């Protein structure tokens, strides 16, 4: 829950998140096909 709020993800982006999109070592979240069909 805190991840979603603090990262500013949109609902559609959260729904499509996968465990493989989380990089715990670098503390990054890779969002595929976000708003405007862009990765961020």
Image (spheres, rainbow, N blue to C red):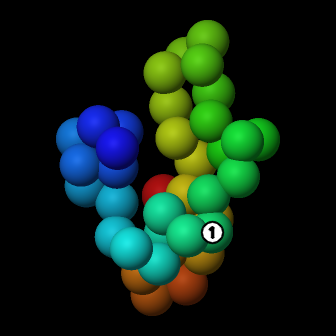
Question: Dot 1: what SS?
Answer: loop
* Viewer-nearest residue: 1 or 38: 1
12 relative to 2, above or below: below
Q: Residue furthest top?
A: 25
The residue to which callout 1 is attached is 16
9 left or right of 23? left
State which quadrant residue 6 falls in.
top left
* Viewer-nearest residue: 10 or 1: 1
Q: Quadrant of the N terminus?
A: top left
Q: Position of residue 11 (x, y in %)?
A: 39, 73
Q: Determine if residue 38 is in view.
A: no
19 left or right of 37? right
Q: Position of residue 22 (x, y in %)?
A: 62, 36
State which quadrant residue 16 falls in.
bottom right
Count of marks placed on residues = 1
Q: Residue furthest bottom?
A: 36
What residue is drawn where x is 34% and y is 60%? 9
* Viewer-nearest residue: 16 or 33: 16
User: Crowding at label 1, few (<14), some or many (≥20) Cα neighbours within 10 Å?
Assistant: few
4 relative to 20, above or below: below
What residue is drawn where x is 34% and y is 70%? 10
What residue is drawn where x is 55% and y is 84%? 37
What residue is drawn where x is 29% and y is 37%? 2
* Viewer-nearest residue: 29 or 4: 4
Q: Position of residue 26 (x, y in %)?
A: 55, 17
């Amino acid at each position: 829950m805190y991840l979603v709020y603090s990262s500013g993800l949109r609902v559609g982006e959260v729904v499509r998140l996968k465990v493989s999109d989380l990089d715990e070592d670098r503390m990054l979240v890779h969002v595929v096909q976000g708003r405007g069909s862009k990765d961020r």
